[in-house]
Amino acid sequence: MKNCNLCLIRHLNAMKELSKEELDRISAYKKVQHYQKGDQLLREGQNTNGIFCIMSGKGKLTRYNSLGKEQIVRFVKSGNLIGYRSAISNEPASLNLTALEEMTACFIPKEAFDEALDNRKFARRIMEMLSEDLKQANMFIANLSQHTVKERLADTLLHLEDVFGTDKEGNINIALSREELSSIIGTASESVIRVLSAFKKEGIIYTKAKKIKLLDKIRLKQIAEGIE
């Protein structure tokens, strides 16, 4: 979608605060780009010189620890704006953005993004997003130190369904490997496999390959909160 004024995705993020004229200017600058599964939109340490607006598809934001192991920080989907922290701070990207399926994204150059920040309502929305990012980062650190693998996995499954919804068969609408799940909660894949098997045996979830269906969300919530 070349014309931002005609794009419904803008209503899902801070760009809904921009005027027709401001959106016209962004439309003149931006580039619509298509990606295949596994393509990297951003690389840690890369100078981005702009932000991405995700039009369709799903992706993951990751970073590598001191041992070179990938850590999934969060997932992205249609409507998300990515890269605004680096664009504001004039710093290289601190995360990698990788497509989990076919994705389409609009790249908005920093010049156009900076102009949009002159709109106070848009700027406030971006500030709110930065605040939420910090809140989520603090919660992630707290979860790693204060909760068991079982509790973290239960919370993650509920979060994934909340973010991505379900398909027509009731499965969480994103296919993740056991390695990716272990990367989210910061543990070994063997631990994730063991806990998933226990959940399945108890009738809390149903799994088939990479598909997971939540059968007892009340019980999962109790587990996530440490209620046994």
Image (cartoon, rainbow, N blue to C red):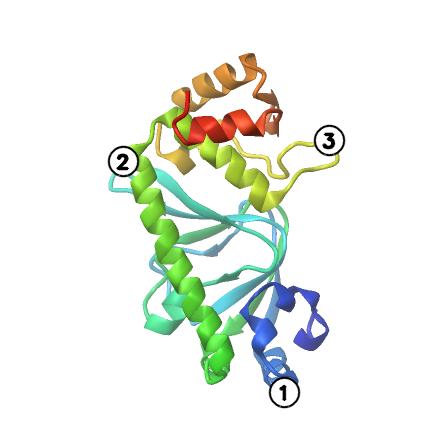
Residues at marks 2 and 3, CA–CA distance in whole angstroms: 35 Å
The secondary structure type at the circle numbered 1 is: helix
Q: Quadrant of the N terminus?
A: bottom right
Please give the residue where the numbered disc 3 appears in the rendered image. Answer: 169
State whether residue 78 is above or below residue 3: above
Q: Is residue 93 above or below residue 26?
A: above
Q: Where does residue 32 sit, x and y in percent of width and height? A: 62, 67
Distance between mark 1 and mark 3 Cα atoms: 43 Å
Q: Indicate whether 193 appears above or below 156.
A: above
Furthest-bottom residue in this view: 21
> Element type at marker 3?
loop
Instruction: Return the residue nearer the eye: 49 or 193.
Output: 193
Marks 1 & 3, CB-CB < 8 Å contact: no
Q: Residue furthest left?
A: 66
User: Label 2: which residue?
Assistant: 145
Q: Amino acid at mark 2?
A: Ser
Place of residue 158 in the rendered image (x, y in percent of width and height, measured from the top left): 53, 36
* Residue at 33% across, 59% down: 45
Q: Nearer the viewer, residue 107 or 187?
A: 187
Depth check, mark 2 against mark 3: the one in front is: 2
| One can see residue 30 in this view | no
Q: Viewed as shown, does residue 208 lie left or right of 227?
A: right
Mark 1 residue crowding within 10 angstroms, few (<14) / some (14–19) / many (20+): few
Please name the amino acid that badge 1 sits on: Glu
| Residue under label 1 | 21
Residue 44, image x and y in percent?
A: 36, 55
| Residue that extends furthest to the top in the rendered view of this protein | 201
Find the distance from the CA under tag 2 to the CA under tag 1: 48 Å
Which of the two marks, 2 or 1, is nearer to us in this view? 2
Near mark 2 (Cα within 10 A), the count class, few <14, some 14-19 or many ≥20, is few
Q: Amino acid at mark 3?
A: Glu
